[in-house]
Image (spheres, grey):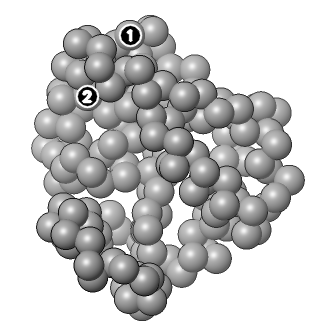
Amino acid sequence: MSIGLVAPNDEFYAELDRPSLARLAGIRRNRFLQATVLPQFGRVAHAEARLHDMAHMTASWLRAQEPEALPIAYDYSIDYELLEELLQLVDPGLVPQLEPVHVGYLLEDPDGIAAAEAAWIATEARYGLGRHHALADALALMARFEAVHGSSRTR
């Protein structure tokens, strides 16, 4: 439905456009999506795209990061799996360059929790985006990582 990626000096966000969202099975039955996620759509300018375009935009952003190996931090396995599926649509050669870095353990770290909360507050103030928005959550995950491990080494 949407993707948020961050690097130390760069951010990327894209979301499915309304017609594409309408075609997703089960979206109307999911209370969490209806109450928390979807109301935040449309807040980032020029982010709406059809699935294929979103895949191209994501691949282009990742390729612009330049390293041969791209470490990708994620807290939930499904997030990484969906990224791989998205890239397979347009740039399957990019997938082997990704280095998955599971950081789910940060969800329980007190310093990580405090950093994520501060990041969500800052993102709300700066962009009007709250928790469970893909970009806000990506920024919070980077803040968690940096709070526990120091400067960012992952996307």
For residue 41, which numbered disc appears in the image? none
Location of mark 2 (residue): 116
Q: Residue at x 50, y 49 (%)?
A: 79
Along the line of sight, which residue is nearer the eye, 101 or 119? Answer: 101
Q: Quadrant of the C terminus?
A: top right
Give the residue type that dot 2 points to. Ala
Residue 6, image x, y percentages:
48, 39
For mark 1, give the secondary structure: helix
Residue 104, image x, y percentages:
43, 28
Q: Quadrant of the N terminus?
A: bottom left
- Picture quadrant where residue 109 is located: top left
Give the residue type that dot 1 points to. Val
Cβ–Cβ under 8 Å for marks 1 and 2: no
Q: Residue at x 77, y 48 (%)?
A: 95
Residue 57, image x, y percentages:
61, 64
Residue 150, image x, y percentages:
44, 9
Q: How dense is the environment of label 1, judged by Cα within 10 Å: few (below 14), some, or many (20 and up)?
A: some
Q: Is residue 154 visible?
A: yes
Task: Using the image, determine if residue 35 lies above or below residue 63.
Answer: below
Q: How dense is the environment of label 2, judged by Cα within 10 Å: few (below 14), some, or many (20 and up)?
A: many
> Is 37 left or right of 150, judged from the image as shown?
left
Q: Is residue 6 visible?
A: no
Q: Residue at x 45, y 89 (%)?
A: 23
Q: Residue at x 72, y 39 (%)?
A: 98
Location of mark 1 (residue): 148
